[in-house]
Image: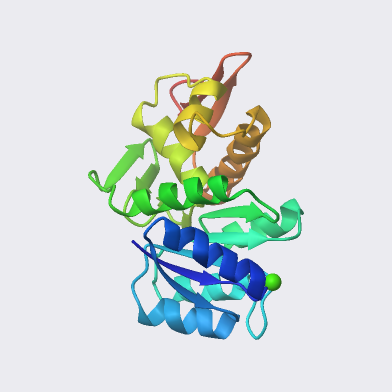
């Protein structure tokens, strides 16, 4: 597996490189956004670990340009700023996941593994429910007239809901399936991503909604359910 790490704090960059090489990953390490973008466009990586605050071109801009160039390599953003607004901005530009610094290496490794698995996972091409189509190879959600790219967690949650639209998924089962049983993510993480998804359904003008069954969980609702 081949990783690109873009991080301008040299000590952190070197530590990350070391951690990844211990896992037998092949690592390219660069220290500014411009080089990061060049490497990402020239080489084929399984995952890109990308700092947000970078010299020359910031991380958000790197992701944006990568996606504009139709490059779908999974991107994990590293952000020092624990502000939801920044995270959402990153995900809107097409990043797949983010971590707030400082973080523990085990969690970083778990997320890198999850992101890399995503690439080889495409068996079905799409899932459909009412007027929504979720494309599993491009991680885009299509409504009647518009489409939007989903972040990694949004995609995983929606894939779960769309794989069995009639079923109510408890928060705990969403946590286990999307974050993994060893994660310390909590119910409010699920709630946050459900609300991102609802906003995207709205943006697409879809008739589909995510219904809440009190104290039980979430399920998809179409026109004929309500
Ligand atoms: Ca930085």
Where's residue 89, x and y in %?
Answer: 65, 61
With 46 as the anchor, is 146 left or right in this view? Answer: right
With 31 as the anchor, is 163 left or right in this view? Answer: left
Where's residue 3, x and y in %?
Answer: 42, 66
With 6 as the anchor, is 85 left or right in this view? Answer: right
Where's residue 76, x and y in %?
Answer: 53, 59
Residue at 35% from the left image edge and 49% from the top image edge: 117
Depth check: give the residue in front, 212 or 30: 30
Residue lying farthest top? 215
Residue at 40% from the left image edge and 79% from the top image edge: 41
Q: Quadrant of residue 81?
A: bottom right
Depth check: give the residue in front, 200 or 101: 101
Residue 61 visible within the image: yes
Q: How many marks?
A: 0
Residue 143 visible within the image: no
Can you tell me which quadrant of the image ligand 1 is in?
bottom right
105 to 223, vertically: above or below = below
Residue at 54% from the left image edge and 45% from the top image edge: 106
Depth check: give the residue in front, 155 or 96: 96
Where's residue 182, x and y in %?
Answer: 52, 31
Please say which color scheme the image uses. rainbow
73 to 58, vertically: above or below = above
Quadrant of the drawing holding the N terminus: bottom left
Residue at 70% from the left image edge and 54% from the top image edge: 102
């Amino acid at each position: 597996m081949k990783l690109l790490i873009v991080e301008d704090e040299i000590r952190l960059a070197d530590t990350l490189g070391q951690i990844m090489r211990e896992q037998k990953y092949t690592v390219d390490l660069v220290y500014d956004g411009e080089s990061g973008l060049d490497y990402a466009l020239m080489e084929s990586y399984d995952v890109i670990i990308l700092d947000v605050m970078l010299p020359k071109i910031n991380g958000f801009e790197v992701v944006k340009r990568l996606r504009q160039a139709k490059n779908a390599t999974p991107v994990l953003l590293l952000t020092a700023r624990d502000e939801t607004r920044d995270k959402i901005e990153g995900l809107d530009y097409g990043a797949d996941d983010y971590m707030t610094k400082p973080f523990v290496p085990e969690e970083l490794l778990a997320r890198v593994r999850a992101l890399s698995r995503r690439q080889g996972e495409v068996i079905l091409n799409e899932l459909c429910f009412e007027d929504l189509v979720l494309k599993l190879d491009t991680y885009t959600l299509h409504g009647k007239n518009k489409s939007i790219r989903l972040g990694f967690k949004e995609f995983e949650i929606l894939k779960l809901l769309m794989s069995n639209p009639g079923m109510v998924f408890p928060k705990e089962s969403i946590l286990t399936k999307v974050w993994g049983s060893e994660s310390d993510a909590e119910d409010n993480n699920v709630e946050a991503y459900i609300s991102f998804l609802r906003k995207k359904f709205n943006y697409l003008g879809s008739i589909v909604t995510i219904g809440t069954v009190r104290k039980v969980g979430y399920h998809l609702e179409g026109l004929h359910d309500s």
